[in-house]
Amino acid sequence: MKGDKLMDIIIILLLIFLILAIILQDIFNPPTYTRFALPLPQPPGQPPLPPFIYFDIDTRFTPSEVSRIKTVISDVLVQWKGHLTQKWNGGLNNGVSSWAACTNMYAFNRLKPVWQLTPVPNGLTALNEAMDLFTQRFIENGFGGIVGKIHYHIPIPITSSTIRGQTAFRRNNVPLSITVNPTQIDRGDITNGVLEGSLVHAWLHRVGYTHPANTYTTYFSGEAPMCYMRGYLPKNPAVPDSIYTQFFD
Ligand SMILES: [Zn+2]
């Protein structure tokens, strides 16, 4: 009996020591970051846009992980430009992009950022606003020096997160910072398109959109990236949303 109690105390002390060691390691070995620039595509009908946007990425990512992350961000920028180009409609500024049309069919809840008072009537208006908020983030980044950080984190369980963004509670001056799970970036069975959807979801948090925990269907921040991942096609009844939402955080 006495020996059991002693063992318990020893185990507790060991656990405390282990936790302290992990905390101390973080304090004395803070992550280091290196900066990269990505060219910002230039869609028509916009305010002056910076030629580049910038990210500080954790140096623990391998060169191939960094390369894939850059590709994923660049691909999302291409789709952002595609939306704005379709909306601009050659100068009429009355177009409905494929992305907006798709989102309008499925998104009905939390159509506005948490910091916004003005209601948003539908998914189409929400998608238009969200892309304009991305534009604002890119301007803040490229012209204003609000550089996004790309944090490194391997979660437990190991596939429980892919790309995560914290919800922003203000309109202006928010970096496009994300936390990326390198294990998911290494996976060959996940397409770039899926990683891009995960990034879009994370960035929607960074402009203020939310959803109830683990609930994505009908919510703007879930349906807009799902539309992206389906190539803006309607839902296939044989494919459950969870095929996509497992990569949202
Ligand atoms: Zn989320």
Image (tube, rainbow, N blue to C red):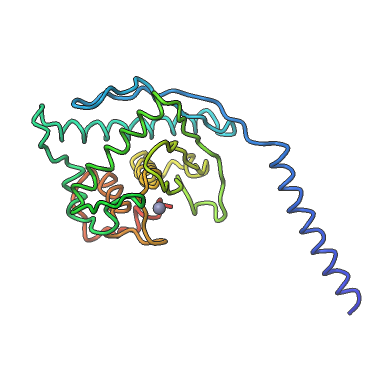
Locate residue 177, reporting x and y percent: 46, 38
Placement of 104 over or under 60, stated as above or below = below
Q: Is residue 142 above or below residue 202?
A: above
Q: Residue furthest front?
A: 117
Q: Position of residue 110 (x, y in %)?
A: 29, 56
Q: Residue furthest bottom?
A: 1
**Residue at the far left in the pictured view:** 92
Extreme residue in the right direction: 2
Residue 86 position within the rendered picture, expressed as x and y whole percent measured from the top left: 15, 34
Image quadrant in which the N terminus is located: bottom right
Residues 23 and 48: in front is 48
State left or right for residue 229 relative to residue 87: right
Identify which residue is drawn at 36% across, 43% down. 207
Q: How many marks do you count on the picture?
A: 0
Q: Nearer the viewer, residue 209 or 9?
A: 209
Q: Is residue 197 left or right of residue 98?
A: right
Closer to us: 3 or 201: 201
Residue appearing at x 55%, y 26% in the figure: 34
Residue 211 point in image, percent of width and height: 36, 57
Up the image or down, 105 lies above or below 196; here it is below
Compared with residue 172, is residue 110 higher up or lower down, i.e. above or below?
below
Dividing the picture into quadrants, the one containing residue 136 is: top left
Q: Determine which quarter of the picture holds residue 69.
A: top left
